[in-house]
Amino acid sequence: MIHTEKNRLEAFSDGVLAIIITIMILELKLPAGDTFADLAALTPTLLAYVLSFFFIAIYWVNHHLILHDVATVNRKILWCNIAWLFVMSFIPFGTAWVGSYPDSWAPVTLYFADMFLACVTFHLMYYLIACENCNVGGKGKNSPKFRLSPRNIISLVTYFLAMVLGGFYPFATYVIVAIVSAWWIFPEKGRDEEAAFCERCQVGKRL
C-alpha cells in the first residue's frame, strides 16, 4: 500500500472547494430592476446559494477536523477524496437549477441527490481514514479515533429522504436539511475518546 503525507490532499481539496464557491457566486444574476421587489424575485436563488454555501463550508470545516490528527493517507483515501470532490463540484449546477425552479420535482431531487452522494462519499473517506490511522506507528489506543455517531446516521438518513421525497415536499425539505446541516456547526463531544471503527481496521486494510 502506497502512503503519502496529507498536505497535498488538504491543499488540493481547499483549492477545489474555493473554486466551487467562486462558481456559485458568479452564477448569481443581478435583479431585473432597481427596486426591492426585483430583489425579492430572486429570493429562491439567494436562499439556494446560502444553503449551498454553508453546506460546503460545514464540509470544509469537518474535512479539516478529520485530517487534523491523521498521520498518513493511502491511495484509497486519495481516490475517495477525489470522488467526494467530484460530487461536490456539481453543487453550483444544482444550486442554479433549484434556485430557478425551487418547487419543481427534477431540480429539487437532483439537488438533494448531490447532497446525499456528498454525504456518502465523505463518510466512506472517513471510514478509510479510520482504518488507515487507528494503529499508525504502533500508537494503538492513542491514535486518532473515528466513529459513526447518531448525528452521522441522522445526516445520512435525512439527505437520503430529501433526495427521495424532497420533490414532493420542497419547502419542508429545505427547512429540515438546513437544520440538520447547521447542526454540524457545533462540534461533537467525546469523539476523540471513542473508537468504534478500530476493530475493523484490519478488514479495511485488506479491501
Image (cartoon, rainbow, N blue to C red):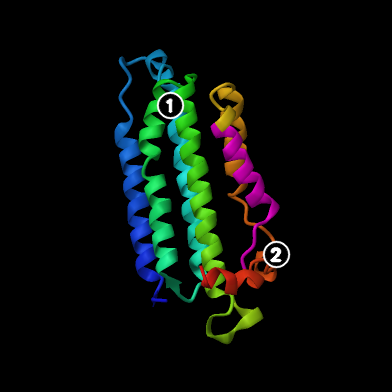
Question: Does residue 78 appear left or right of residue 205 in this picture?
Answer: left
Amino acid beneath label 1: Val
Q: Is residue 10 above or below residue 114?
A: below
> How many residues crowd around disc 1 within 10 Å: few (fewer than 14), some, or many (20 or more)?
many
Q: Residue at x 69, y 60 (%)?
A: 189
Q: Position of residue 195 (x, y in %)?
A: 67, 69
- Kindly check if marks 2 and 1 are in contact, taking CB atoms under 8 A apart as contact: no
Q: Residue at x 35, y 34 (%)?
A: 93
Q: Position of residue 48 (x, y in %)?
A: 45, 31
Q: Which residue is mark 1?
A: 98
Earlier in the chain: of badge 2 and badge 1, it is 1
Is label 2 or label 1 in front? 1
Q: Is residue 131 visible?
A: yes
Q: Residue at x 46, y 39 (%)?
A: 114
Amino acid beneath label 2: Gly
Q: Which residue is mark 2?
A: 190
- Label 2 – label 1 distance at C-alpha: 37 Å
- In the orientation shown, which residue stands out farthest toward the front? 206
> How many residues crowd around disc 2 within 10 Å: few (fewer than 14), some, or many (20 or more)?
few
Look at the numbered disc 1 and give the secondary structure of its residue: helix
| Residue 164, image quadrant | top right
**Magenta-highlighted stretch: main secondary structure?**
helix
Q: Position of residue 118 (x, y in %)?
A: 48, 47
Q: Is residue 144 visible?
A: no
Report the front residue among 113 and 17.
113
125 in the magenta segment: no
Q: Residue at x 57, y 43 (%)?
A: 181
Q: Position of residue 161 (x, y in %)?
A: 61, 34
User: What are the residue bounds of the magenta stretch?
Assistant: 145-163
Which quarter shows the N terminus?
bottom left
